[in-house]
Image (cartoon, grey):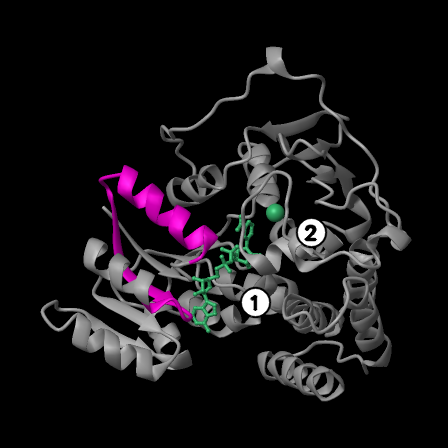
Amino acid sequence: MKNISIIGSTGSIGTQSLDIVRANKDLKVVALAAGSNDKLLLKQAMEFKPDIIGIWDEDKASELRTALSEFDIRIVSGMDGLIEVASYVKADIVITAIVGMIGIRPTVEAIKAGKDIALANKETLVTAGHIIMPLAKEYNVKILPVDSEHSAIFQCLHGEEDNKISRLLITASGGPFRGKTREELADVTVEDALKHPNWSMGHKITIDSATMVNKGLEVIEARWLFDVKPSDIEVVVQPQSIIHSMVEFEDGAVKAQLGTPDMKLPIQYALYYPERRYLAGDRLDFTKMNGIVIDKPDKDVFKGLEFAYNALEKGGSMPTVFNAANEEAVALFLNRKIKFLEIYDIIEKCMEEHKLIPNPTLEDILNIQKEINECIKSKY
Ligand code: NAD
Ligand code: MG
């Protein structure tokens, strides 16, 4: 029996993780946490009967205590609650399905408590990869990628531990606006940007896919997960989302992982690594495919990639600035306070104005996030 804790259980990755638990008798949910969806969290608590649940808001926690009074479930709230859920003593593995830099502290505490991490929350690795990866090594815990591209690379690298990687080829779908010019993007709406062609995901990552900031974040995520030089990470567009990513080795051989676009596969792979299990769902039918398309990304229009490579080159606190500015800008766009292209302007300005901290501590990272939040809030 593997005991699982999930932070962000009511979101896209969280609910699909629970589908995996439903389909496998040897997985048990021992702790769950969510942000604001108390109704769904209540349902999940009644179905899975974890020992602890956490909800951000203390008033909602108090209501949940009443609703769940007949169950033996501890109900916690706020950051302390999130940390308690992430580091719960009975959990073997924590799925970090929470969105944004709020995942940093619970992830750090989970590692210190000796939990393996099934990592979906890429923002944590982007901003604190230089802290997370050595910490995981120190505490001898695994960081198992859930992001589909990184899971693909991880699957390709299985059995290749002693071989040298020459390049990582990260695939991008190109999002809903692939092929569009800057002029055409000037007036796109929130609804347009939320129409992802292949994946159904949370709002924030769907907007990140439309700007290709998501791919930028994934380049930085890959740099930390696989310890490769940024110049050895290339992004290619694969609009069908069938090739989930590829690895090129020293001898020129390229390994790829393919499959239908279904996040349950990477989630399940992380939970059972290195074992594979049956997973229900569609299979690829190559006879019905009209070729596999691979294209170059349009880096001039979709500046998310350029920002990421710049942030990696500057290093230190710059990836934090890139990510924190994006989190704020995406929230403004979703709240219809700014236009789509202004997301790029905000990120660019924050990165230009930032005074680099070469080796930021956790405190520095969280302070930068706070400063950026306050700075952007004061302007919009
Ligand atoms: P989502 O918006 O659907 O879900 C986010 C979850 O985080 C929700 O359960 C929400 O309640 C929880 N949350 C937010 N604020 C919280 C708080 N203050 N306290 C506790 N919980 C809080 O997002 P998602 O699409 O599932 O993405 C989650 C993470 O996984 C992101 O980092 C994203 O980049 C990454 N990811 C997602 C996908 C995908 O297919 N959805 C794919 C790859 C990577
Ligand atoms: Mg991805």
Q: Residue at x 64, y 47 (%)?
A: 195
Q: Residue at x 70, y 82 (%)?
A: 372
Left or right, 309 with respect to 364, comes to right
Residue 106 appears at what percent x and percent y?
Answer: 44, 71
Residue 185 appears at what percent x and percent y?
Answer: 82, 54
The segment highlighted magenta reads 11-38
Residue 325 appears at what percent x and percent y?
Answer: 71, 73
How far apart are the two marked residues, 2 and 1, measured between alpha carbons?
Answer: 22 Å
Q: Nearer the viewer, residue 329 or 18?
A: 329
Whether residue 87 is visible, yes or no, is: no
Q: For marks 2 and 1, give the one nearer the viewer.
A: 2
Q: Quadrant of residue 213?
A: bottom right
Earlier-in-chain disc, 2 versus 1:
1
To which residue does mark 1 refer?
A: 100
Q: Quadrant of residue 350?
A: bottom right
Q: Quadrant of residue 311?
A: bottom right
Circle 1: element type? loop
Residue 43 appears at what percent x and percent y?
Answer: 25, 59
Callout 1 environment at 10 Å: few (<14), some (14 to 19), or many (20+)? some
Q: Within 8 Å: ligand 1 and the Cβ of disc 1?
A: yes
To which residue does mark 2 refer?
A: 192
Q: Nearer the viewer, residue 266 or 184?
A: 184
Left or right, 161 with respect to 211, comes to left
* Number of residue marks: 2
